[in-house]
Amino acid sequence: MAFIKPMQRHPANPLIQPCDVKPSGPGFLVQGAFNPAAVRFGDEILLLLRVAESCEGGEEEVAVPLMRFENGVGKPDVLRLAKSDPQVDLSDSRYVRYRGQTYLSTMSHLRLARSTDGIHFAVEERPFLSPADASESFGIEDARIVRIDDAFYINYTAVSGDSYATALVSTKDFRTMKRHGIIFPPQNKDVCLFPEKINGRYFALHRPWNSEFGQPSIWIAESHDLIHWGNHRCLLRPRVNGWEDERIGGGAPCIKTPKGWLQVYHGASAGHTYSLFTLLLDANDPSIILKRASSPLLEPCEQYETGGFFGKVVFTNGIVAHDDGRVSIYYGAADKSCCLAETTVEELLASLDR
Amino acid sequence: MAFIKPMQRHPANPLIQPCDVKPSGPGFLVQGAFNPAAVRFGDEILLLLRVAESCEGGEEEVAVPLMRFENGVGKPDVLRLAKSDPQVDLSDSRYVRYRGQTYLSTMSHLRLARSTDGIHFAVEERPFLSPADASESFGIEDARIVRIDDAFYINYTAVSGDSYATALVSTKDFRTMKRHGIIFPPQNKDVCLFPEKINGRYFALHRPWNSEFGQPSIWIAESHDLIHWGNHRCLLRPRVNGWEDERIGGGAPCIKTPKGWLQVYHGASAGHTYSLFTLLLDANDPSIILKRASSPLLEPCEQYETGGFFGKVVFTNGIVAHDDGRVSIYYGAADKSCCLAETTVEELLASLDR
């Protein structure tokens, strides 16, 4: 598939690869450094990567990394299973299924990467955020960052043997953090907080899983404090168009534009191909949809997007809108690396009419 | 199975049956009058029944009742499918599955029933609460009521083509109502609000569906206003004991006792048998489990519990604790009728030690 306007993939892609990231400890192998949150912090662009690590294991075994929490104290652990066991199902590279239970083949944490030009990043040597309690014992994934006044709110997916949900922390300096617990209960991910109050209320896009009466769709909710959420409403549903037939979910926090709130969301096809789409929400009431693009903004076509750990995926949860109208869309490619596509607010708005 | 202490089924069971309920309109057939919320209101005991209605249809068709909402205005509609169509799946009496979509075989609304003795109820002729927007287009189900000061808060399951979730309304007089929208997003039901603030916060039990990394469990959440919820934590998980292996969910709102908050929850076995269990939570922090009964308080064994619309079900979402220590547990039997079991706070607490 050819290059798709109005996005320019950066020639230095992928910007960050697993080999650029130091494992969090002995016995861990970095399989993915992807799906970065992105934010401007002083003179820097910060990415908060999802670093997915597997465990070293023998050739004939699969080693599942996880954390055990006892009395609030976490300890790394490994579940070792024989690949030859007929009850071990490895058909999806992301999962290990065994005796009716699902585990993750990798455990993720969040790692900071810093840059002054937005292209060359120095990845920190230690995790920024690691699983901190039993609700995170299978890992933490796919952060989003919004700045509100002088604080940065970071939400991410917390995964455990009790399901997956969205948790929130906040920081002012990217050194110390305050934990706010799970803000969207299972099964929920792809949460995008809006960066300011709108008519006196905070808003969030979120993606409750839906297995019974419909398909996984984007919902919107309201809050007075970013921690307690209510007035949940279904906002946007999948469409049968070959790109987003199966499920959709929010991307990075919305960008404020003169035309309304601009969202870049992802859709997944029946074949698990992930593409990106633009969506425009009303400036004064983001539960009102103004425009939805009819075709993708970005589809996986480069080798680093079609191959990788879980192929055919472009996924964004980190976008930086610059003062001059340029927009840097950081995105995860194939659950493996961090990439960049460059565009402008003008081009993104124009994509809604094509 | 023999009578199980410490519960006394009332000899007048079932107290309310489908034949006691007038259909909500022409063409509807009442299939179930069950799963009542219960509350004392002045000199009366009020039940808020779930009334499930099917549509009259030809012998060779299945008629799915639903509501269509356009510009906020709802209109009853019927989806008619040929029973002979191989794509029509009627294997579970509660559902109609067709071409990958799931519908409900009945549409539910909430109906008031009034009594002065708690045994003989007069069922009102008109619905108390009917589907009011697109999030309720497949019906509203399984209410719970708590009184806080002079207001009654009623939560219920809202079902639509966008999934199921828990919505909240409040009333002071059971005539006029205020809607507070969806408070727990999909897929979520079995919500029990606590009837007072505990250490400055409201609490709720809720049951997020869980299909990926564990089993459907009871969670606890916190709120300052009953409308916006956060700090979600997994509280209680299913156990492999033949009664609650598959999933559990909250029952009626907790009863305040000298020993702590007393909850009667339900568990479902692999064979979809629903039983009731007692649970004791800490008086000052209901996220702390003090005791969990090792065997059921009530199992389906009477004919009206084992037969019915969906058999082998006892399910409570309405309990009245009287001033003299007696407890009236109203419960739905087999998704068909309303029943009563009588006990005392003392007996319920003792059940936790057996």
Image: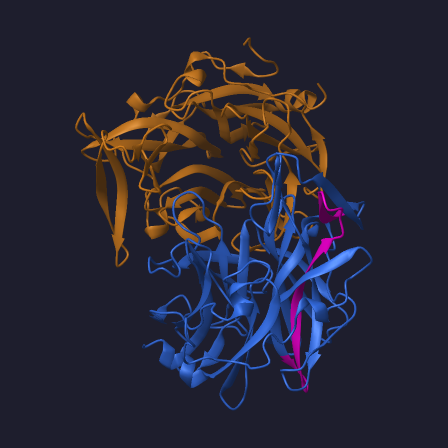
Chain colours: A orange, B blue
Q: Residue at x 55, y 57 (%)?
A: B189
Front residue of this view, candidates A39 and A111: A111
What span is in magenta?
B40-68
Q: Is residue B175 above or below residue A305?
A: below
Q: Is residue A185 left or right of residue B152?
A: left
The answer to which of A175 and B263 lies nearer the viewer is B263
Q: Quadrant of residue B175?
A: bottom right
Between residue B273 and residue B199, name the one nearer to us: B273
Q: Which residue is located at x 26 percent, y 37 percent?
A: A64
> Does residue A22 appear in the picture of this structure?
no
Quadrant showing the N terminus of chain A: top right
Task: Judge whether residue A151 is colored magenta.
Answer: no
Question: Residue B53 lies in magenta, yes or no?
Answer: yes
Q: Is residue B263 above or below residue A208?
A: below
For residue A7, side relative to residue B61 (left or right): left
Q: Position of residue A353 (x, y in %)?
A: 72, 21
| Residue that sits furthest to the bottom in the current view | B324
Residue B37 in the image: state x and y as whole percent. 61, 70
Residue at 55 percent across and 74 percent down: it is B195
Quadrant hosting residue A128: top left
Quadrant into which the C terminus of chain A falls: top right
Q: Position of residue A339 (x, y in %)?
A: 44, 21
Q: Position of residue B348 (x, y in %)?
A: 42, 79
Left or right of residue A316: residue A79: left
In the image, taking residue B237 as reference, residue A343 lies left or right, namely right
